[in-house]
């Protein structure tokens, strides 16, 4: 699991620039979620965690769901 402990430092005020970070993270998660479980190989889960203050949580969830 990867975590970004200060998303405000990594995320721009621009939604287009935030997409530069969020879109690839979403693509990687979808890729690994869609891989079939192969015999003798464990399923791989990709997770990225953005830590944010409680007051920013709802906005962050809405935005990450768009990608």
Image (cartoon, helix red, strand yellow):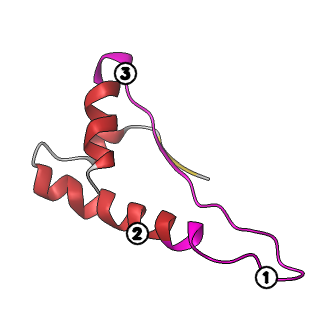
Residue at left offset 36%, top offset 67%: 24
Q: Secondary structure at mark 2?
A: helix
Q: Horizontal and vertical percent for residue 29?
A: 50, 63
Report the span colored magenta: 31-56
Identify the disc placed on residue 53: 3
Q: Horizontal and vertical percent for residue 39?
A: 86, 83
Residue at left offset 28%, top offset 37%: 62
Quadrant in the picture for residue 63: top left
Drawn side of residue 22 relative to residue 5, left or right: left
Residue contact at pointers 2 and 1, CB within 8 angstroms: no
Q: Secondary structure at mark 3?
A: loop
Identify the disc placed on residue 27: 2
Work out whether mark 3 precedes mark 1 in sequence or the reverse, and give the earlier one: 1
Quadrant in the picture for residue 19: bottom left
Q: Which residue is mark 1?
A: 38
> Is 42 placed above or below 25 here?
below
């Amino acid at each position: 699991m990867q975590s970004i402990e200060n998303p405000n430092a990594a995320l721009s005020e621009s939604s287009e620039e935030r997409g530069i970070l969020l879109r690839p993270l979403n693509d990687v998660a979808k890729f690994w979620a869609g891989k079939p479980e192969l015999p003798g190989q464990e399923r791989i889960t990709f997770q990225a965690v953005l830590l944010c203050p409680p007051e920013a949580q709802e906005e962050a969830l809405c935005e990450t769901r768009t990608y």
